[in-house]
Image: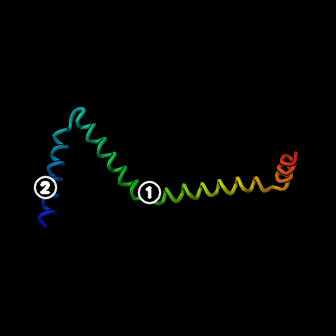
């Protein structure tokens, strides 16, 4: 319970700090920091999905490349080039 109260006090103090920094560069800096932290939190939740999607797209690209190499006339062309 004490940890929750301490966290609440820290958050309230941070809120007061933000209100006092309502003008100038300090406010812009704090807002940028807040936005970056929000982006990281969102990305952290999506990272597994993003990695899976990248892997899926890589597999598709690999299969498309393999498909191009297995076209009959391509195999014949490669065979002729190898025997020459």
Percent across and percent down for residue 8 are 16, 58
Percent across and percent down for residue 50 are 49, 56
Q: Nearer the viewer, mark 2 or mark 1?
A: 1
Q: Residue at x 38, y 54 (%)?
A: 42
- 49 relative position to 82: left or right: left
Q: CA distance from mark 2 to mark 1?
A: 32 Å
- 6 relative position to 63: left or right: left
Q: How did the renderer colour the structure?
A: rainbow
Q: Which residue is mark 1?
A: 47
- SS type, badge 2: helix
Q: Residue at x 78, y 56 (%)?
A: 70
Q: Residue at x 29, y 43 (%)?
A: 33
In this view of the protein, which residue sits in the foreground, 63 or 22?
63
In this view of the protein, which residue sits in the foreground, 36 or 80?
80
Residue lying at the far front of the rendered structure: 83
Q: Residue at x 15, y 46 (%)?
A: 16
Percent across and percent down for residue 5 are 13, 61
Residue 9 badge? 2
């Amino acid at each position: 319970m004490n940890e929750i109260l301490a966290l609440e006090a820290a958050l309230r103090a941070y809120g007061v700090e933000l209100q006092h920094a309502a003008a100038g560069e300090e406010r812009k800096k704090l807002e940028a920091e807040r936005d970056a932290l929000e982006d990281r939190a969102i990305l952290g939740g999506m990272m597994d999905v993003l990695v899976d999607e990248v892997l899926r797209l890589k597999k598709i690209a690999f299969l498309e490349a393999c498909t191009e190499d297995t076209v009959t006339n391509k195999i014949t062309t490669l065979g002729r080039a190898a025997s020459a």
